[in-house]
Amino acid sequence: MTFKERLRALRGDMTQADFANRAGINVNTLRNYERGDSIPNLEIAASICRYFEVNSDWLVLGEGPMHRGDNATTTAPTQNQPQAQPPDDDFKMTDMVTMTVEVLESETIYRTALASNIRAFHQAVRSERTLARLEERMEQLEKRMEELASENAYLKQRLEQHEGNNAKAVGEDG
């Protein structure tokens, strides 16, 4: 089940206008979500989960029961979805997202600190990706340099042969 299908299932018989109003979003925004044209940001997803008492794992990832406290078994990933790697011991992405949203919604100094750290980590990730691309490009350039050095050596050899042949021809004519 895709995100848009889960959102429609959550809305059930409720009108789009009523659902959007309760979720605190514009009805056109909800339409875009249900068509799959866009997805909500973390704050909106967390708000929907809180208001409708929906399990965030279910809404965001399609795993677990629909509502908090339900004992339904987790939904198996579809063939189109890659199998997620098991989380580290105490790490669940949805818990981290929920905690992040809670801090960002607060009016404390922690909000500023978290936003600053998120920016720093984001920059670090971007820098790491850039570095990996640069290293890959360097390897390509090194290979090309080796090819050019080999070609240069070959051309020098041909030039020497050509000059040798010219010298012989001049000597014979001389």
Image: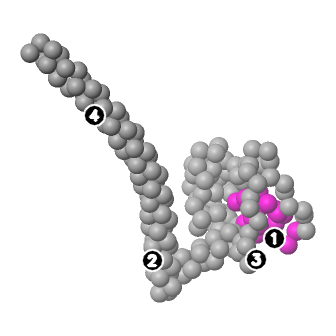
Q: Is residue 58 left or right of residue 174?
A: right
Q: Which amino acid, by three-letter code, is at mark 2? A: Ser
Q: CA distance from mark 2 to mark 4?
A: 58 Å
| Viewer-nearest of discs 1 and 4 | 4
Residue 156's label in the rendered image is 4
Answer with mark 3 or mark 2, whichever residue precedes in sequence. Answer: 3
Q: Which amino acid, by three-letter code, is at mark 1? A: Arg
Q: CA distance from mark 1 to mark 4?
A: 76 Å
Answer with mark 1 or mark 4, whichever residue precedes in sequence. Answer: 1
Label 3 secondary element: loop
Question: Front-most of 131 and 105?
Answer: 131
Which contiguous range is marked in magenta? 51-70
Label 2 secondary element: helix
Q: CA distance from mark 4 to mark 3?
A: 62 Å
Q: Could you say which quadrant of the image residue 52 lies in?
A: bottom right
Q: Which amino acid, by three-letter code, is at mark 4? A: Lys
Q: Is residue 148 left or right of residue 172?
A: right
| Viewer-nearest of discs 2 and 1 | 2
Q: Which residue is mark 1?
A: 68
Residue 89's label in the rendered image is 3
Q: Which residue is mark 2?
A: 116
Residue at (28, 34) in percent of width and height:
156
The reply to whether residue 148 is visible in this rendering is no
Determine whether label 3 and label 2 are within 8 Å by CB.
no
User: What is the image's colouring?
Assistant: one colour
